[in-house]
């Protein structure tokens, strides 16, 4: 054996493990068994594993099932995992055993060996045993779904919700700033009756607000923890008080409200909460995609597009066309949407594949959810700060386009009827005139009546123009 390796053992026999690694034989087997994607679990999930192991040790210590010395060492080692000091000690590929057993044992071995060091022993001597002590009263089948929910809800509460609120605030600021900018509305990408630019941004703001509400709704279901169900949900080898105590410690560690699952069989065999919660993420991604697309269209040009918004100059837009500026941040948001939709397909399919007493898609569910939450969080903040906040209205162009719009004829309906209004619109288009000009020229309205009936600003409010209040 090279000096660069040490011998570790598990139930299948000896394994050669890198000498400086805290992981043991089972992790090494997983490294060799699953050279599939090169993708390992994210910081958020590794942190959650540390939180679960720390809380389990504290609960077992309270219950007299784990002595003080070992519990203290496990807690200290788990704290280091929580803090990110050992992320390089979690080398197992996401695509592994469907229960996530490899990652659970990875955490058990790393924490056990580090705890042994803390107690003054050598790595690998098992003075702190990965199964008997770190994993006491637990199974991969309840640890991994618990870590899934802990990492998912922490990602939602600490990253996604604040990021979405940043975007909401940016959109709200533009709603107020653009409140008096009257512009042409568009349906079917064709001219429609006037709106204000502020009204459109108010719609975008409300989309984000409703996204926040959708995520808020799923938080309760993500707050349920499978821990305490052990292998199949019965809780064999676990103290009756362990699940509730561990959940309390997890809540204390994270500052997020968690509780024992309503039903441990459901919590391990089905992952509907993950599917439901990711569905909210997919919907939010769709909202951001819609907003980004609209802002790209409204800022198109600068001379031969809609040109109602002036976009920020974040970077040169072309390697060949000098002076070209593209809506690069909005395009990044569009691409995030497509990735989240793909992730949602994996999450919804995986969550539906529980068989009898266990769902075997836990790692891919966790990975895809956390990737989506992270991308949406980052995209929302970048979109808010580097694009939305820097948008400016081209007020003169908006006013000119409104006056030239054929859709102003809609306001003529109550005054002269649909058929005559249609003739006015068609003649205005054919003759290159405005609706106002044709309505007066044809004798349908006087100048004063036209000013009242064809006031674009008044058209942005509910009501019938030209009638007495």
Image: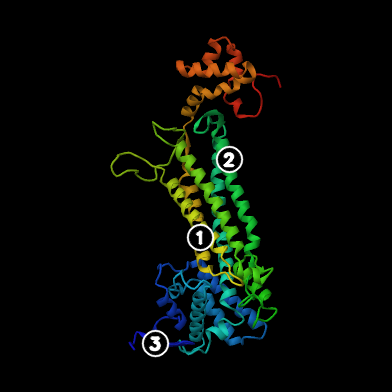
Mark 2, secondary structure of its residue:
helix
Q: Is residue 247 above or below residue 404?
A: below
Q: Badges 1 and 3: C-beta atoms under 8 Å apart?
A: no
How far is disc 1 from disc 3 in space, using C-alphas?
Answer: 39 Å
Residue matched to label 3: 6
Which one is nearer the viewer's eye here, 301 or 11?
11
Please tell me in which quadrant of the rendered image residue 150 appears: bottom right
Are circles 2 and 1 on residues that touch, CB within 8 Å?
no
Q: Nearer the viewer, residue 380 or 34?
A: 34
For the view shown, which residue lies furthest in the front direction? 356
Q: Which residue is mark 1?
A: 346
Answer with left or right where residue 433 lies relative to residue 58.
left
Label 1 sits on a secondary structure element that is helix
Do residues under tags 3 and 2 come within 8 Å of each other at their CB atoms?
A: no
Locate residue 236 relative to residue 17 in the image: left or right: right
Q: Earlier in the sequence, mark 2 or mark 1?
A: 2
Q: Secondary structure at mark 3?
A: strand
Cα–Cα gap, marks 2 and 1: 31 Å
The residue pinned by badge 2 equals 203
State the residue at coordinates (56%, 79%).
75
Residue 309: image x %, image y %?
46, 35
In front: mark 1 or mark 3? 1
Instruction: Give the number of the disc on residue 384.
Output: none
Can residue 24 be seen by looking at this rendering? no
Whole-angstrom CA distance, mark 3 to mark 2, is: 62 Å
Nearer the observer: mark 2 or 1; the answer is 1
Q: Is residue 414 visible?
A: yes
The quadrant the C terminus occupies is top right
Instruction: Please give the name of the residue rendered at 58% of the width and 36% of the height, measured from the top-left corner.
Output: 199
């Amino acid at each position: 054996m090279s000096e660069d390796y040490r011998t570790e053992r598990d139930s299948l026999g000896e394994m050669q493990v890198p000498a400086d690694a805290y992981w043991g034989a089972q992790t090494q087997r997983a490294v060799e068994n699953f050279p599939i994607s090169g993708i390992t679990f994210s910081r958020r999930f590794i942190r959650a594993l540390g939180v679960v192991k720390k809380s389990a040790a504290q609960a077992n210590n309270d219950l007299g099932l784990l002595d003080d010395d070992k519990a203290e060492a496990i807690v200290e080692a788990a704290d280091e995992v929580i803090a990110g000091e050992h992320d390089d000690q979690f080398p197992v590929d996401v695509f592994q055993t469907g229960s996530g057993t490899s990652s659970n044992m990875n955490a058990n071995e790393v924490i056990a060996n580090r705890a042994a060091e803390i107690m003054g022993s050598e790595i690998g001597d098992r003075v702190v045993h990965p199964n008997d002590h770190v994993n006491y009263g637990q199974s991969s089948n309840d640890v991994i779904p618990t870590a899934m929910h802990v990492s998912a809800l922490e990602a939602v509460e600490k990253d996604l919700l604040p990021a979405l609120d940043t975007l909401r605030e940016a959109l709200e600021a533009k709603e107020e700033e653009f409140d008096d900018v009257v512009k042409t509305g568009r349906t079917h990408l064709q001219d429609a009756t006037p709106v204000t630019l502020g009204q459109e941004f108010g719609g975008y703001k409300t989309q984000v607000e409703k996204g926040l509400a959708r995520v808020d709704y799923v938080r309760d279901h993500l707050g349920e923890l499978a821990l305490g169900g052990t292998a199949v949900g019965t809780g064999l080898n676990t103290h009756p008080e362990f699940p509730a105590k561990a959940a309390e410690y997890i809540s204390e560690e994270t500052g997020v409200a968690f509780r024992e699952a309503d039903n441990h069989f459901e919590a391990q065999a089905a992952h509907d909460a993950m599917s439901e919660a990711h569905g909210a993420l997919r919907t939010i991604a769709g909202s951001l995609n819609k907003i980004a697309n609209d802002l790209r269209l409204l800022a198109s040009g600068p001379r031969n597009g809609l040109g109602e918004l002036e976009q920020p100059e974040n970077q040169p837009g072309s390697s060949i066309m000098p002076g070209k500026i593209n809506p690069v941040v909005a395009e990044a948001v569009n691409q995030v949407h497509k990735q989240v939709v793909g992730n949602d397909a994996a999450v919804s399919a995986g969550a539906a594949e529980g068989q009898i007493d266990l769902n075997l898609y836990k790692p891919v569910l966790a990975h895809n959810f956390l990737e989506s939450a992270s991308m949406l969080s980052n995209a929302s903040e970048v979109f808010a700060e580097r694009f939305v906040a820097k948008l400016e209205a081209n007020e003169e162009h908006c006013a000119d386009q409104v006056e030239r719009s054929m859709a102003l004829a809609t306001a003529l309906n109550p005054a002269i009827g649909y058929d005559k209004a249609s003739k006015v619109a068609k003649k205005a288009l054919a003759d290159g005139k405005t609706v106002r000009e044709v309505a007066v020229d044809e004798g349908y309205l006087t100048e004063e009546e036209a000013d009242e009936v064809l006031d674009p600003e008044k058209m942005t409010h509910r009501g019938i123009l030209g009638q007495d209040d």
